[in-house]
Image (tube, rainbow, N blue to C red):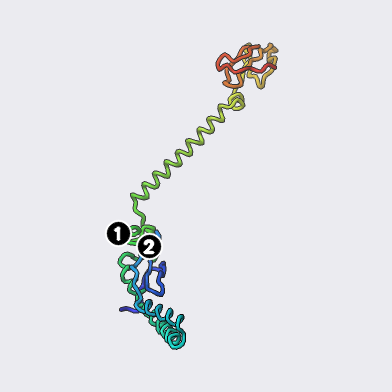
Amino acid sequence: MANKISFTRSYSDLSTGQGFQFEFQCDRCGTGYRTRFKPFALGTVSGALDAAGGLLGGVLARTAGLAERARSATWEKAHDNAFLEAMEELKPDFIQCPRCMSWVCRERCWNRSKGLCKTCAPELGVEMAAAQASRVVEEIWAHSKMAEEDREALKEKSWRAGIQAACPDCGVPLEGNPKFCPECGRKLAQESFCTACGAKVSPGAKFCGECGNKLTTT
C-alpha cells in the first residue's frame, strides 16, 4: 500500500475508540461520501479491562493501564491504515480539475465532454436556462416599475400639471388658472374638475356626473 495518496482536502474524521469512519466532501457542491464503519478489534477488549480495573483495582488496574497504552499505539496505526483505505475506496468517486485543482464529485460536478469541473466549464444548456429565467425576472420587475409610474400619472397632481388651457378668443396659452386673458382681456370662465376622476363638472354642482363623488365648494 502506498504511504501517500493525493486526494480531496475536504473530509471529516468520524472515527471513535470503537472503530473508524470517514466522510469526504466535493469541493464544489459539498456532497459527502461516507465509508462504512470499520470496527476496531481492541476497542471492546480495552473497554472490558477498563471496567474490570475500575471495579477491582490492584493488579487488574495496572493491567488495564498497560492495555490502554498498547491500545493507543495500535489504534493510531489502525486509524492511519483505515484512512488510507477510505481514500482508496472513495477516490474513484472524485476527480481533480486540471484548471482550478479542486477535487469534485464525478456524478454532479464534472463536465465529461470538456474534461473540467462545471465551475470552469459550465454546461451550456443549464447556463442558457438560468439566463432565460433571469431575463424573465428582470422583465417582470421592469413591468412592475412601469405600472407604478402609470399609477403615479393617474394622480390628480400629475395629470393636472399637463393641462394647459387657451383663451377661446385669441388662442393664447393660459398658465395657471387666470380669471382674465392676459392678451385680450376676455373674462374666462372658471372650469372645475372632479378630484376623484378628473371629469369636468358644471359650476355649482354638488356631485360629479361621472363618478358621483361629492364635490367641495369654495
Q: Nearer the viewer, residue 147 or 215?
A: 215
Residue 78, image x, y percentages: 36, 78
Q: CA gap, disc 1 to disc 2?
A: 21 Å
For the point 30% across and 79% down, the residue is 1
Labels in figure, total = 2
Residue 24, image x, y percentages: 38, 66
Q: Secondary structure at mark 2?
A: strand
Quarter of the view holding residue 116: bottom left
Residue 176, image x, y percentages: 66, 21
Quarter of the view holding residue 159: top right
Residue 158, image x, y percentages: 59, 27
Type of amino acid under label 1: Arg
Q: Secondary structure at mark 1?
A: loop
Quickly name the residue at label 1.
Answer: 112
Quarter of the view holding residue 115: bottom left
Q: Residue furthest front?
A: 56
Of the two numbered discs 1 and 2 in the rendering, the one whose residue sits closer to the viewer: 2
Q: Earlier in the sequence, mark 1 or mark 2?
A: 2
Q: Nearer the viewer, residue 166 or 194?
A: 194
Type of amino acid under label 2: Gly
Quickly name the residue at label 2.
Answer: 32
For the point 34% across and 53% down, the residue is 123
In the rendered image, the quadrant that contains the C terminus is top right
Above/below status of 183 relative to 82: above
Residue 182 can be seen, yes or no: no
Q: Nearer the viewer, residue 78 or 155?
A: 78
Residue 108 can be seen, yes or no: yes
The residue carrying pointer 2 sits among few (fewer than 14), some (14 to 19) or many (20 or more) residues within 10 Å by Cα, namely some
The residue carrying pointer 1 sits among few (fewer than 14), some (14 to 19) or many (20 or more) residues within 10 Å by Cα, namely few
Q: Nearer the viewer, residue 186 or 58?
A: 58
Q: Residue furthest bottom?
A: 59
